[in-house]
Structures are given as structure tokens and as C-alpha cells.
Amino acid sequence: MSAIPERRAQALTSADHEFLRTLLHQRTGILLDPSREHFAEMRLGGIANDFGFDSLPDVLEAVRTEEHWGVLHRLVVEALAIAETSWFRDAQVWVELRQTILPELLERRRGTRTLHFWSAACATGQEPYSLAMQLGDRIDGWQVRLLATDFSQGILKRARAGGYNQLEMNRGLPASQLVRHFRKTPEAWEIRPEVRSRVEFRELNLASAWPELPPMNLVLMRNVLLYFEPELRRRVLRQLARLLRPDGVLVLGAGETTLTMDDSFEAVALARTVVYRPKNGSR
């Protein structure tokens, strides 16, 4: 992002920041910490530059007067939403996926040779593409659907394109995967078509009504629930309990748990991490 001209760096008021937090929460369920006011102003600075606003308060005034959920509303919400991701994020989880979770799923589904995976809040695509690379040729001849969703249209556009800059490539991607699954262009590193074609990207807002989804064998919903208020966490977990197959697996972030939130799941301690399965009859 280019530097913000001095006239655009005018700070927002406390009321402005409260408006932004309310807008983000209403649209996505995300609770933005009040301590992140500087983060919010930096993100809005990019919109001010792109649209030629003279100051950050001018951006807010345009949002307040814009038609309900117009283009600027969407851009501001997408700018404020946190989209932190990397390749094979949290290495211990991926070790368990490779050594335990995926082999067990493949064994249990050998008869039907059908699997459904969901990467929720997938951001720019590193997580679902990591899963596609992890699956490798083990799913040749299988009917596998790898769904990746996010509420942000801009982020999904980037994820579908499958192009990443050098800084993004340096975040967790093993050299062996780089050589095998990417090609270098003058503009970016591009994931090869055979990997990109395995992932289906769709717009889905976890805080709103979900579309019809197939029963899932594996759901990755990591570092998402911690940004939601308790009631929304419970609602999301109830929906997940109904969506997962009886032997399905839910993977949350390291600081997240279903405990005290929903009794439809049981924690399963693996060697390196904890995952969750629906309890008998939770569906």
C-alpha cells in the first residue's frame, strides 16, 4: 500500500471507530478489538488512496450515506476483516493430517471412494491449497470435493487466481512443495493448474444463513471462532455438528475449543494436537 498523504491521515473519532466495529460485527460476526484502531485506520487509508478521498473521515461519511450494503460498505468490511494465513500453518496440525487423520479417513471411505473437505474462512487460499498438496496422488480415482469459503469477494478472487508474491511464498512453504506445485512468472509464483483445479472456492458468510452443503468428512475452521461472540460460536458449532459425518473430524485453531460452547462434540487427543468429532447422535 502506498503511503497515505498527510491530509488523509486525519485520525478518526471514537464514534467513528465504534461505527466501524459495529459495521464489521453486523456483517461478519467478527469482534474487532478496540486496541486495533491504528490497524483500522491503516486499512481505510488504502481505500482513501484508491478512491481519492481527502481524509479518513470522508471515507466514513461516504459509507454512512451510501445505499445499503453498496460497494464501499463491502470494501470497508473486507479491509477490516482479519485475513491472516500461511502455508501449512501450525506445523503439528499438518503432521497429524498427513500421518493420522487423512489415512484414517481414506481407510474408512475405501468402499465409496468419496470424500468431502471444507476449509472455512480460507482467506487467500493457502490452507485449502496446502490440503490439496497434502492429499497428493492418494486421491487419484476418488471423488473428492475440497470446498473453500470466505465472505470476501476480493479475497476469493485472489485465491482462485492462485498467484502469490515472494513474501507470501516464504511463509511456511517447504522447498519440495514449491518445486513440485508452483511455477514462477514475472509477476508472481503461480500454483499449478492440477492443484488449483482441486479446490472449489465459494462465497459464504459464517455469520449468515449457510447454503446447502454436503455432509463433511473433514472441516478446517481454524482461528475463526475466537473472533466471534459466544452466541455466534455456539450457533456455528451446532451447524457443524449437523454437517459433519458421524466419523467426521473438526479441526480448530490452537487457542479454540468446543468445550463450554457445545456438547455435541468430543475432544480427541492426538499425539501433536486435539481435534473434535461429533458425539453419537449429535446429528
Image: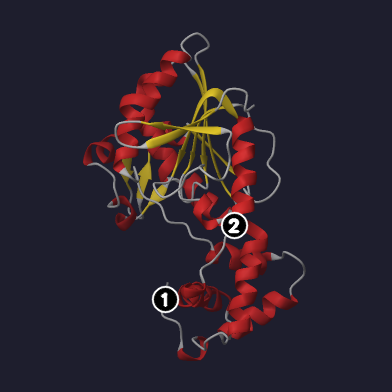
Residue 53 image point, x, y percent: 59, 82
**How many numbered dots are placed on residues in this image?**
2
Q: Residue 244, can we see it?
A: yes
In the displayed structure image, the side of residue 31 where residue 174 appears, left or right: left
**Three-letter amino acid code of the residue under disc 1:** Ser
Q: Residue at x 39, y 46 (%)?
A: 254
Q: Which residue is mark 1?
A: 2
Figure quadrant of residue 166: bottom left
For this rendering, which residue is in front, 36 or 84? 36
Graded by Cα atoms within 10 Å as few (under 14), some (14 to 19) or many (20 or more), the crowding at tag 2 reads few
Residue 236 image point, x, y percent: 61, 44
For this rendering, which residue is in front, 30 or 129? 30
Q: Residue 181, can we see it?
A: no
Figure quadrant of residue 152: bottom right
Q: Residue at x 37, y 45 (%)?
A: 190
**Three-letter amino acid code of the residue under disc 2:** Glu
Q: Which residue is mark 2?
A: 229
First along the sequence among labels 1 and 2: 1
Looking at the picture, does residue 105 appear above or below residue 205?
A: above
Instruction: Give the CA distance from mark 1 to mark 2.
Output: 34 Å
Residue 261 image point, x, y percent: 56, 45
Q: Residue at x 42, y 46 (%)?
A: 253
Looking at the picture, does residue 102 appear above or below residue 63?
A: above
Looking at the picture, does residue 191 appear above or below residue 185?
A: above
Which dot, 1 or 2, sits closer to the camera?
A: 2
